[in-house]
Amino acid sequence: MNLTQLFDLSFKGRQDKPALEFEEHVHTFGDIDRRSNRMAQFLLSRGLAQGDRLCVYLPNCLEMIELYLASVRLGVIFVPINILYREREITHILSDADPKAVVADDTMPGTFWSRQEVAREAARMPAERPLVPLDGDAPAAIVYTSGTTGVSKGAILTHNNFAANALNLLTSWRITENDRLWMPLPLFHVHGLGNGLHCWLIGGLCMRLLGRFEHQTAAAELLDFRPTLFFGVPTVYVRLLETPQDQARQIGVRMRLFVSGSAPLPAQVLEDFRRLFGHTILERYGMTETLMNISNPYEGERRPGAVGLPLPGVSVRILDSEGQPVADGETGELHLRGPNVFAGYWRREQATRDAFLDGWFRTGDLGVRSPDGYYTLAGRKSDLIISGGFNVYPREIEEFLLEQPEVAEAAVVGVPDRLKGEIPVAYVVTRGTLDLAVLEARCRLKLASFKVPKGFVSVEKLPRTALGKVQKHLLPRWEA
């Protein structure tokens, strides 16, 4: 079964039900179906066929959804581009994906079809759905990794990958057509595209799509739409902590589930949010290459700092640097296997081979499993600091720093050291004034000596991706 057939649970089974609110317009599932058919007819008229790539450089908008659905119906491979990318990054993706066409707003360099032109032309097309036979192994999208280390690679995600992921989340998080999804996440990322869009369409719920998250209006939006479901990232939850208490409680009364992902959720943020909104955020763990892997349970303990238990059908193992399994409580690299795991990197056979070991995907993420099966992430393997022969995990130090009331954000990196090989250095965003010597003294009191940062740098903000992941390679250079 392909995605179009799954989406028909809503397009045919719920065609008169309100489906999407965007820019003060309400569209039913039937409306979205017809508009997507017209978009598919437009792509056909421009010569796009199964296997062609369509690059899309757009903010959240109705056309973004229509282009994705049209691509899925035709077997065209959808390639979303992060709208924060600039010419160098865009040029790499266009060269690598080799698209048949590009749709963009006027801010994109180069030659492309404008969103306005596409919308006008598609509106003139017939609403009959083109029939293209596809199986579940057909590629649906190529989503490029953030490229924080090395060149960005395109992960090939199939119809089966997206379907398995959505069906898992619908079941595990009890998502039904009675839910109302508030959606400010960008659709160019797998969090918004893989989780939000697919759960919405298969589950048949009503979604309010926003152009982007704006913290100044977030509380008013939430009170107006009255959602029951929200997929967010840690930086958004930090911003929501600024919500006045009476408004936070009103929002919390109607909400059923807050989910966090795309970057580690500090345990302190989870606790502060629970006190303010009356909800325990459900943290989960996913990747561009695998969509969702591990999740705290809907029923049961949502453990602060942990990402939970493997989702149905997903197998997880932890191996040391020699490729041997580690015992519970010990740190190693997470390896994954399941129907959610991508088909490989676009036109990169060697990178694909290197990414797998005995059929298991090597995530590059370090983790620990507790005796009762909960997994906790310890950071990227590439972020591991080996100082004087000791393994130092930045996540552990960052969590401690974030427990300090004067620290709003923290990132710990390893820098070369002649004597110890590497030493940890902490970059912090502070609330008000904070003597960094006091912060160092607190670390010395609570952390082993080899974990104490040898330098503390106060910065105005941490460089982050569009989804809030810290880009440590962009931090200013530390000088002893």
Image: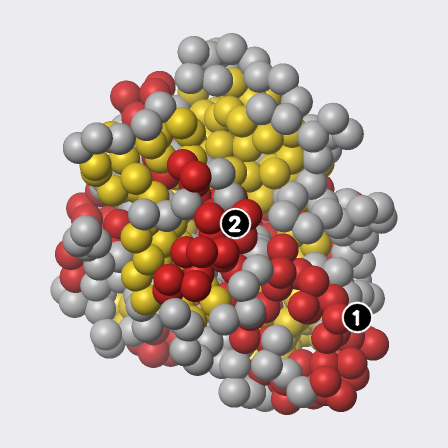
Q: Secondary structure at mark 2?
A: helix
Q: Is residue 229 visible?
A: no
The three-letter amino acid code for the residue at tag 2 is Leu
Gap between marks 2 and 1, in whole Å?
33 Å
Q: Is residue 466 above or below residue 4?
A: below
Q: Is residue 443 above or below residue 256?
A: above
Residue appearing at x 33%, y 57% in the figure: 456
Residue appearing at x 49%, y 38% in the figure: 448
> In the shown orientation, is residue 438 left or right of residue 233?
left
Residue appearing at x 22%, y 69% in the figure: 108
The three-letter amino acid code for the residue at tag 1 is Gly
Q: Which residue is mark 1?
A: 278
Front residue of 182/37: it is 182
Residue appearing at x 25%, y 42% in the figure: 415
Residue 376 is situated, as x and y percent measured from the top left of the image, at: 61, 38
Q: Which residue is mark 2?
A: 445
Front residue of 234/95: it is 234
Q: Secondary structure at mark 1?
A: loop
